[in-house]
Image: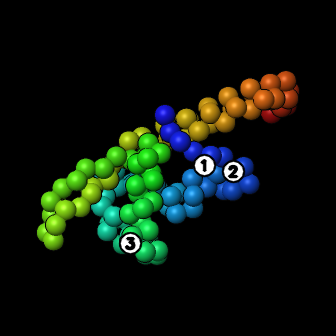
Amino acid sequence: MFDFGYSPNKKGMGKVLGSMESEIMEIMWKKKRATAKEIFEALKKGKRSSISILLQRLCEKGLLSRKEEVAKGGRRYVYFVKIDKRSFERYVVKKVMDSLIESFEESVKEYLKEI
């Protein structure tokens, strides 16, 4: 469904997304739809071309979709959220837990009893 790695030593969404990807997704979850220019202006950092590349990667990972539209000055992409934040978090938890259980079933069971 979604393509992501897992970095347990990072914080928040940084565990499964890059830091800029995480910041972009936080903005997208609030806005629901945005252009690269709007994201760039909200972040107030990075290059606009880098933001466009990250938005494309988030589309490839299945978190966003995009639609081309004609606007003043030419064509542009409008990006849309494909999954809300809560659903994505639940998906990540399930994938991580499934992976841990597959590799360390008994230890996971013991740990879950402790907490």
Using the rendered view, name the quadrant where residue 47 is placed: bottom left
Residue at horizontal 19 percent and vertical 62 percent from the top: 75
Q: Are marks 1 and 2 in contact (CB under 8 Å)?
A: yes
Amino acid type, callout 3: Arg
Viewer-closest of 55 and 13: 55
What colouring style does the render use? rainbow
- Amino acid type, callout 2: Ser
Residue identified by numbered label 1: 16
Q: Splitting the image into 4 quarters, where does residue 24 fall?
A: bottom left
User: Is residue 113 visible to us here?
Assistant: no
Say which residue label 3 marks.
48
Closer to the camera: disc 3 or disc 1?
A: 3
Q: At 57% across and 61% down in the image, what residue appears? A: 19
In the rendered image, residue 100, in percent from the top left (x then y), is placed at 74, 32
Determine whether 50 is above or below 14 in the image. below
Badge 3 or badge 2: first in the primary sequence: 2
Check disc 2 and report the residue beneath it: 7
Alpha carbons under labels 1 and 2: distance apart: 6 Å
